[in-house]
Amino acid sequence: MIATLGQAGAGADWFAWAAIFAAGFGAGTINTVVGSGTLISFPVLLLLGYPPVVANVSNTLGLVPGSLSGTFGYRRELRATAHLARLLLPASAVGGAAGAALLFLLPSEAFELIVPALIALGIAMALLGPLVQRAAARRAASRPEAASVPWWKTAGTFAGVLLLGVYGGYFGAAQGILIVGLLSLLTAETIQSLNGLKNLLVMVVNLIAAATFALIAPASLDWPAVALIATGSALGGLVGARIGRRLPAPALRGAIAVVGTAAIVYMLAT
């Protein structure tokens, strides 16, 4: 940890601080564009000697400003999904709190074993989303009187985001990819609008999870690490929004597939 490295001299201190800040910046940028930035910042904390729970908790809180700045960058796209945001924000909040509580009740292996499969599922959903949306549009055109969203689809969207909130509060790797994949299948919104909504939902999950961590186990938060990741991720979120909003829809889905695949390879190799 930083305190431990500090005993080795100022040079080690500065190296650790720079590494954590850079990891936060990279995570904030990638989270805003596609998701899975946790797979940058979390391993850096582990490599610097932080215990896994401390690294997970501190990283979760540190990434909140990145989600906030990314959400601000996507504020125009968010207007198109305001109705979905009102429906799904409570699901993300409840899920994030439940997942954070589970972190102190279940071993980390409980989720880590299935994370690669979840990421692969998220990639598949994101890539298949346009096909499903076009098929739904054709059905709606042939039956104009049934233009309203079926109740089961609304319920499924709420339940899915709730479960992903639990996952995000517990571990969080690539939760953004999973959210975009799910919403691509169950809604008719554009990929850019969903990306903006994803940033908002991830921010809520991380914020609620971090608040739960602070109540249950405040000693698990390492505030210097939180501050460095928060500063880096806030800047990274602004940069990520500028990049992501300029990507054509196919390129954005391709980026999701590439980053998600890299995350799967990384997790299976470590």
Image (cartoon, rainbow, N blue to C red):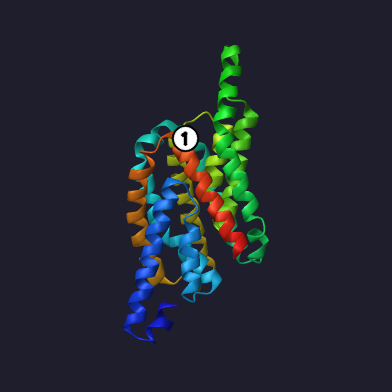
In the figure, 150 relative to 50: above or below? Answer: above
Of residue 157 and residue 110, the one placed in the foreground of this image is 110
- Return the x and y of residue 198 as percentages of the image width and height: 47, 43
Q: Look at 48% across and 55% down and name the residue there.
A: 206
Picture quadrant where residue 102 is located? bottom right
Q: Look at 63% across and 65% down and name the residue there.
A: 108
Disc 1 is placed on an element classified as helix
Of residue 254 and residue 186, the one placed in the foreground of this image is 254
Q: Quadrant of the N terminus?
A: bottom left
In the rendered structure, which amino acid carries the disc numbered 1?
A: Pro
Query: Which residue has dot 1 on it?
Result: 250
- Return the x and y of residue 167 as percentages of the image width and height: 59, 53
- Left or right: where does residue 145 sit relative to residue 196? right
Q: Look at 63% across and 50% down and name the residue there.
A: 118
Of residue 214 and residue 147, the one placed in the foreground of this image is 147
- Return the x and y of residue 203 as percentages of the image width and height: 45, 51
- Left or right: where does residue 117 sit relative to residue 24? right
Of residue 217 and residue 38, the one placed in the foreground of this image is 38
Q: Quadrant of the C terminus?
A: bottom right
In the figure, 59 relative to 245: above or below? Answer: below
Q: Look at 34% across and 70% down and name the residue there.
A: 18
